[in-house]
Structures are given as structure tokens and as C-alpha cells.
Amino acid sequence: MAEKTVTLSFSDGTPDATFPVMESTMGPDVIDIRALYKQTGKFTYDPGFMSTASCSSTITYIDGDKGELLYRGYAIDDLAKNCDFLEVCQLLVYGELPTKEQHKKFSELIIHHTMVHEQMHFFMRGFRRDAHPMAALTGLLGAMSAFYPDSMNIHDPKVRERSAIRLIAKMPTLVAMAYKYSIGEPYIYPDNSLSYAGNVLRMMFATPCEEYKLNPVLERALDRILILHADHEQNASTSTVRLCASSGTNPIAAIAAGVASLWGPAHGGANEACLNMLNEIQEQGGVEKIGEFIEKFKDKNSGIRLMGFGHRVYRNYDPRAKLMRETCHEVLGELGLEKDPLFKLAMTLEKIALEDEYFVSRKLYPNVDFYSGIVQKAMGIPVQLFTAIFALARTVGWIAQLNEMVTDPDYKIGRPRQRFIGSTPRKVKPLSER
């Protein structure tokens, strides 16, 4: 079969240049332009990398038009309904779903690495009590590199696996520490008898004063949140992890860079921004005023933004949103919060978005951030901690992406190009003449 190629023609006298077309198993094929500069002396220009494939990957596939998300070929709804988070971790990191015995060994390995070095507690004291949890988490992860000097060699598969186990295991402990510190409560150590999600909830909400009773509905809800956020192709934070790791830095530092990138309100902070929006509507009159808010949103000159609706990648319904919607109603029902003013407001907004022609015609459906924010709020997780929970979930995806990049034969240190539009060469005048 003849190799597919594409030929570029130029109107400025530059000779034609031919490039191979690389086929994909799903999604668009890509034009291999690695020789573009060598052949033509030109770069491509693609702000935001909207039409540029930065790597070849076998991990996650998104079809935005169909509203499809696959992890290693498995549909997200199939995984969320039939697997727990640690099974999905094994799928992403090792490439296949585990057997019963493999899952048991992996779970035990994670459970026995959940504690962090005791000196991390002292490190935590350097932060202000009101510091944003993501600021604390970024600092704590960066510090972990100093606590584990045996995790420096990113090119050693054993080192990367050791780092992966540590990061997956210790992230819940660090997130819970950031929360407990902010409210002045003592840290709760991990309990090896609990599930991964159960441990997160206990470390966050238990106190030494009384026995903590784990609610299985909330445990499953958090597990589903973690699964749905575990990976999402080459987004900003994942690309940050890959770019950072391409320099050869240690895996823990690369993940810390991912946390910093995730912090932004346009990325991991979207569910936090969504809850803040709901609170603002509530303060302005709640359900009775929602019609006015919607009309202002429809007016392009109002400057009103609707958070938690639509998605940059999904041109149809966000497949994660359907699953999170089910979980949302389960949690609200379990906790008896259907009539809570804020959640009633959220459900009213959801109903409008699913029925109003303005939203339907533009496919501005509620996305996963809309529902996950509501669920976490109902569970008692403070709004400022939402992005840290996201980081906890996404850690495994970052690890899988980092491992894939380092073992890719085409791997090189990242070095984006630029279009320079500044001053041409000029002379420096003496200070007295300026």
C-alpha cells in the first residue's frame, strides 16, 4: 500500500514540499511536518495547538462530535459502571484491566504507601491557614522530590513505577492534609482497611473525637468522580507534565507542574467557578431571578459567563456529564438535599439548559464540571478543594502520559517555535542620547 502524502505549494517562490500522512486508528490522520523547516525555512502557526498533534498516544481518545471518551479503548460509561478507581489506574498505567489477583496486589501496594513522611507535617505549617489548597498541594508535591531522592531518574522504568505508586497512594493524604490544615483540625492518618475513595473521605471528615461512619453512596460517588477525571487526552495540564518531563526532570516534579497548570479556572478550576456562579445567583434572588440571569447571559454585551455548560472539545453532550448527573441525583437523594435552595437552583438551571432552544441549538449542555461541583458541595467538600480533588484523580493520567512520552522513540525535549513580530536589529544609544 502506497504511503499517503500531502504536498504544500507556496505562492512566494518556495519550492513545493511533500510530507507523509500518518494514519490514526481513530480520529483525524496527521501530517508529519517535522521536516517542514528544513525543507522550506518556515514554521507553522497554531496558537493553542488547535490543529497540532504534539505526540502519538495509545491512552485516551476523545470524539467531540460523538460525545465519546475512551480509556485504552474502553468507553468511560462502561468503566465507571463496572470498575473501581484503582482498576482504572491499572488500565491507564499498565495498558490493560487487571485480573482479580493483579488488582488485589496493586490495591495492597497502594494501601501500604498512603502515609507521607512525618516531616511533611512540619512543612505544611509554613503555609498560611487561608492559603488555597492548590497552592499548598503544589508546594507539597514539589517538596516530595526532596523526601524521595531515589525517584530522580525519569529514564529508569523501576524509578517511574516506584514514583507512580507513591504519587497515586500519597495524593489523597496530601489533599486531606491541605484541607485539615485550613480548618485547624488534626490530620487523620490513612486506614488500610478502607477503599481508596473511602480513605479520602475519612481523612477529610473524620476527627479523633468520634468514630467515622463511611456512607457507601458517597464513597461510590467520589470513586466515580475520580474515574471520570482520571485522564482527558492532551489537555493543558497533561501537556504541561509532558513538556516538563521532556527535560528529564524527576517524575514527582513533573506532576507538581501539572498541578500548577490544573489550578487555572479555565481548566481544573471550572467546577469551582461553577459553584461560585451558583452562589452569586443565589445571593441575587435564587430561583426567582434565574430567568433574568439567563436573559443577561443570552445578551452578548452583558459580559455574563455561564460556567459549567458546553465544552471546548465536546461539540455534543459531555459523556462524563451523563454519569455524573446520575451520581448527582443519587447523592442529593441520599442526603435529602433536593430542596436545598442552592441545589434546587442548580437543578432549575439544568432543566432550562436541557429544554431552552437557545441552549439546545448551541449544544450548551451541562458538562461534568457542573455536576461534579454540585456533588462535591453536597458531600461537604469545600469549593476551594474541588480542584485538588481533580488533581488527585488526574495524577494517574499524568503518570501514564509521562511514561508513554519517555518510552516513545520519537521523544525529544519540547521546544515550541514562535512567530517573531518584534523590532528588527537596532543599535543601543548612549544613555545621554536617549
Image (cartoon, rainbow, N blue to C red):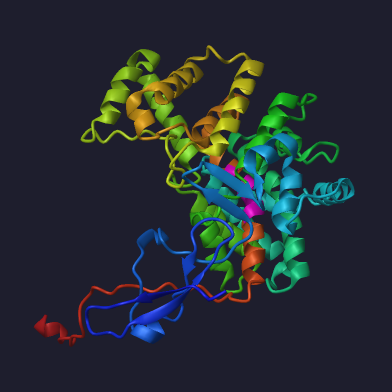
x then y, percent, for residue 228: 61, 41
**The N terminus is located in which quarter?**
bottom right
Against 141, is 359 above or below?
Answer: above
Residue drawn at x 57%, y 54% is: 138
Residue drawn at x 63%, y 22% is: 331
Residue drawn at x 74%, y 37% is: 82
Residue 76 shown in magenta? no
Against 171, is 380 above or below?
Answer: above
Residue 396 shown in magenta? yes
x then y, percent, for residue 390: 58, 43
The reply to whether residue 123 is in sight is no
Left or right of residue 11: residue 221: right
Q: How many marks?
A: 0
Q: Nearer the viewer, residue 377 or 72?
A: 72
Q: Nearer the viewer, residue 24 or 237?
A: 24
Q: Which residues are magenta?
A: 390-397
Against 38, is 255 above or below?
Answer: above
Q: Nearer the viewer, residue 317 or 377?
A: 317
The reply to whether residue 354 is in sight is yes
Left or right of residue 151: residue 307: left
x then y, percent, for residue 365: 44, 32
Q: Nearer the viewer, residue 138 or 17?
A: 17
Left or right of residue 420: residue 384: right
x then y, percent, for residue 235: 50, 54
Against 298, is 430 above or below?
Answer: below
For this orientation, the residue located farthest to the left is: 433
**The C terminus is located in which quarter?**
bottom left
For this orientation, the residue located farthest to the right is: 101
Q: Main secondary structure of the magenta part?
A: helix
